[in-house]
């Protein structure tokens, strides 16, 4: 009776703590006026930052021609042969809508600046995808007079027009009045996707079609997040190939690959992506990714260096390739609009069933909750609902533990009876389990059933664009780590700051493990010490999640808190050890028929016992 009284107090205490937390979350929710003020503040910050540029983003650029030097211009024209028909002029042409800003240079006809107009980095600088020479694009080919050319070295003649409300930019590298190589860009209003065409006219005989024409696209990912190591973990070259299969290069080390029938290439920089789409597919693509991050750094400006080389085929001596550029957020709501291109497949939802649950269950469900709840509260509500939905599995797992606990004295007696004869002891134990209607594996099955849910949620928080730069309580960005204290030094594997949400999650995990594995924990020979694991797991959690998204730590904290509450209710309200013991005794009286598995196991043990006896003779 005294035990029940203490447990009832535990339940009341837990309910009070949980109620206080919910009240605190409710009290700290932003008012409509605060939300409007925050929005106005962010807009002002972005507007003031428009003239700022990302730091540490310099990269080598193609050699420039001094157009004021007539001898330099003459030397340039002599090197490029027929393409000297185009008068070299410096300058760029701007294409922009409400979403994205592009600058295309006369030199190379390529995009030399791509900036998001509605997003900024952790330090309030506009998000740049292309800036200051971090990217290059060009065609490499050979002319009929044996000149090796690269369009990055050629000057293009720009012509800007409008077609059905779209901005159309034609960049032509001319080899004569009606002979040219053209890059054509078409930007639509309110669209991140830009139509891009590479074509030639009258170039049969100028470009040697018997030699390969290679398209080369390079990009060094500019840092956008507070933790470059965390951002780099989700920065990756992903590609669609061979009738819709999606694959990727390594996210942690240098990697190279050659693939066939490539439809699109995505240089993903965690929450933003640069994508090149070819609906007619590239016959082959030679891909490479180079990791530029050695560890956490406050000054490192780049994450990875990507490169892709694709040969282009000429038909009738001419080039004609219809493609698309995408510079925009890695947001499932945005990328799903391009369903025919399957660009949403570039988001790392997770493998197999885990990714399916993440993409089609948790992502839309969280989107629904956050449409009318503050983002942090939406995480808490989603966590509560998920844990309640999984409570039957928690019940079955705890019921199995309770049954094993009831049988523990009888198992101990078997241990004393058979002493060192492990085989006899095992046979007798299995027989006891069979009579009592208890399966040692019944507690594992519900836990395994929950694994897809846990993994899907683990992948949800790092890939959810909806969490980016959304504040909650002391965390100013749920997609990055929260900071309650900065350290004057760096702790290996931990960092130079203290995050509070991982501490709360670690404490909750410790108490959860105390409830599930902390009591009656015998250490079997050859088995790991469960008490050591009980103390190690929270510490690992603390170190592992200190640099992870605070939204993920918030989820683990609330999830474990709720699980503790559910288990307290199951233990003290739902389950009755006396009834469980009585039911087991009733089960033992009933005749039990062995199934095939049990019979097979018994026979194997008997054979092993027989062989052991023969060996002793």
Image (spheres, grey):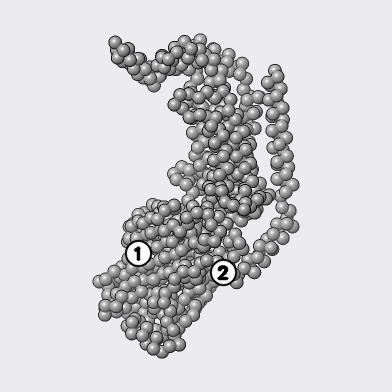
Task: Give the residue number, with chain letter if any, for mark 2.
Answer: 53
Q: Nearer the viewer, residue 428 or 372?
A: 428
Q: Position of residue 409 (x, y in %)?
A: 54, 15
**What secondary structure is found at the residue carrying circle 1?**
strand
| Residue 167 drawn above or below residue 560 | below
Tell me if mark 1 has few (under 14), some (14-19) or many (20+) residues whose alpha carbon lies within 10 angstroms of its own.
many
Q: Report the quarter where the C terminus lies.
A: top left
Q: Position of residue 103 (x, y in %)?
A: 50, 73
**What secondary structure is found at the residue carrying circle 2?**
loop
Q: Position of residue 583 (x, y in %)?
A: 56, 15
Does residue 346 show up? yes
Q: Nearer the viewer, residue 71 or 591?
A: 71
From mark 1 to mark 2, how far is it between C-alphas?
Answer: 31 Å
Q: Residue at x 71, y 22 (%)?
A: 5
Does residue 164 show up? no
First in residue order: circle 1 vs circle 2? 2
Q: Residue at x 63, y 52 (%)?
A: 486
- In this rendering, the label closer to the viewer, 1 or 2: 2
* Pointer 1 with pointer 2, Cβ within 8 A: no
Q: Report the quarter where the N terminus lies.
A: top right
Q: Residue at x 58, y 28 (%)?
A: 518
Tell me if mark 2 has few (under 14), some (14-19) or many (20+) residues whose alpha carbon lies within 10 angstroms of its own.
some
Which image quadrant is residue 340 in?
bottom left
Task: Give the residue number, with chain letter if any, for mark 1.
Answer: 310
Q: Point out which mark residue 487 bears.
A: none
323 left or right of 94 in image: left
Q: Position of residue 147 (x, y in %)?
A: 29, 78
Q: Residue at x 57, y 38 (%)?
A: 538
47 left or right of 597 in image: right
Query: How many discs appear?
Result: 2
| Residue 530 drawn above or below residue 164 | above
Which image quadrant is residue 170 in?
bottom left
């Amino acid at each position: 009776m005294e035990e029940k009284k203490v447990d009832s107090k535990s339940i009341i205490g837990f309910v009070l703590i949980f109620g206080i937390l919910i009240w605190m979350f409710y009290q700290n929710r932003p008012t409509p006026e605060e939300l409007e003020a925050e929005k106005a503040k962010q807009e002002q910050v972005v507007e003031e930052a428009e003239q700022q540029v990302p730091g540490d983003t310099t990269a080598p650029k193609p050699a420039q021609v001094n157009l004021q030097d007539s001898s330099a211009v003459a030397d340039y024209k002599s090197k490029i042969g027929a393409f000297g028909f185009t008068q070299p002029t410096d300058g760029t042409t701007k294409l922009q809508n409400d979403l994205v800003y592009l600058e295309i240079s006369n030199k190379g006809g390529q995009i030399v600046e791509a900036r998001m107009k509605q997003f900024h980095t952790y330090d309030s600088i506009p998000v740049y995808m292309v800036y200051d020479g971090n990217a290059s694009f060009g065609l490499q080919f050979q002319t009929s007079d044996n000149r090796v050319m690269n369009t990055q070295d050629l000057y293009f003649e720009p012509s800007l027009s409008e077609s059905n409300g779209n901005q159309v930019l034609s960049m032509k590298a001319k080899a004569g009045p009606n002979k040219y190589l053209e890059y054509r860009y078409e930007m639509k209003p309110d669209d991140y996707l830009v139509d891009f065409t590479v074509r030639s006219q009258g170039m049969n005989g100028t470009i040697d079609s018997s030699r390969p024409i290679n398209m080369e696209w390079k990009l060094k990912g500019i840092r956008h997040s507070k933790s470059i190591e965390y951002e780099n973990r989700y920065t990756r070259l992903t590609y669609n190939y061979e009738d819709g299969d999606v694959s990727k290069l390594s996210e942690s080390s240098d990697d190279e690959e050659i693939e066939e029938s490539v439809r699109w290439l995505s240089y993903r920089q965690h929450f933003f992506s640069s994508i090149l789409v070819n609906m007619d597919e590239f016959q082959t693509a030679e891909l490479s990714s180079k990791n530029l991050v050695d560890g956490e750094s406050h000054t490192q400006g780049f994450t990875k260096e990507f490169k892709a080389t694709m040969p282009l085929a000429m038909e009738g001596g001419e080039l004609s390739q219809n493609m698309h550029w995408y510079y925009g957020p890695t947001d499932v709501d945005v990328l799903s609009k391009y369903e025919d291109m399957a660009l949403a497949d570039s988001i790392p939802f997770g493998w197999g069933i885990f990714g399916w649950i993440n993409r089609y269950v948790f992502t839309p469900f969280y989107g629904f909750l956050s449409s009318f709840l503050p983002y942090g509260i939406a995480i808490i509500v989603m966590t509560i609902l998920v844990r309640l939905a999984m409570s039957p599995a928690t019940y079955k797992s705890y019921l199995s533990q309770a049954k094993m606990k009831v049988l523990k004295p009888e198992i101990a007696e078997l241990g004393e009876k058979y002493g060192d004869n492990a085989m006899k002891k095992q046979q007798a134990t299995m027989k006891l389990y069979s009579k009592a209607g208890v399966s040692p594996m019944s507690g594992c099955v519900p836990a395994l059933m929950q694994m897809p849910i846990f993994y899907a949620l683990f992948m949800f928080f790092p890939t959810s664009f909806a969490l980016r730069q959304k504040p909650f309580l002391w965390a100013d960005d749920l997609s990055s780590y929260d900071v309650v204290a900065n350290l004057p030094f760096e702790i290996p594997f931990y960092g130079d700051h203290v995050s509070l949400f991982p501490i709360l999650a670690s404490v909750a995990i410790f108490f959860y493990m105390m409830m599930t594995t902390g009591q009656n924990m015998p250490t079997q020979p050859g088995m790991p010490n469960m008490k050591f694991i009980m103390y190690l797991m929270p510490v690992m959690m603390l170190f592992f999640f200190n640099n992870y998204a605070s939204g993920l730590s918030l989820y683990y904290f609330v999830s474990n808190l709720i699980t503790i509450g559910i288990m307290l209710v199951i233990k003290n309200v739902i389950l009755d050890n006396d009834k469980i013991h009585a039911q087991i005794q009733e089960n033992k009286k009933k005749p039990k028929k062995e199934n095939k598995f049990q019979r097979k196991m018994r026979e194997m043990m008997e054979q092993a016992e027989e062989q052991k006896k023969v060996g002793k003779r």
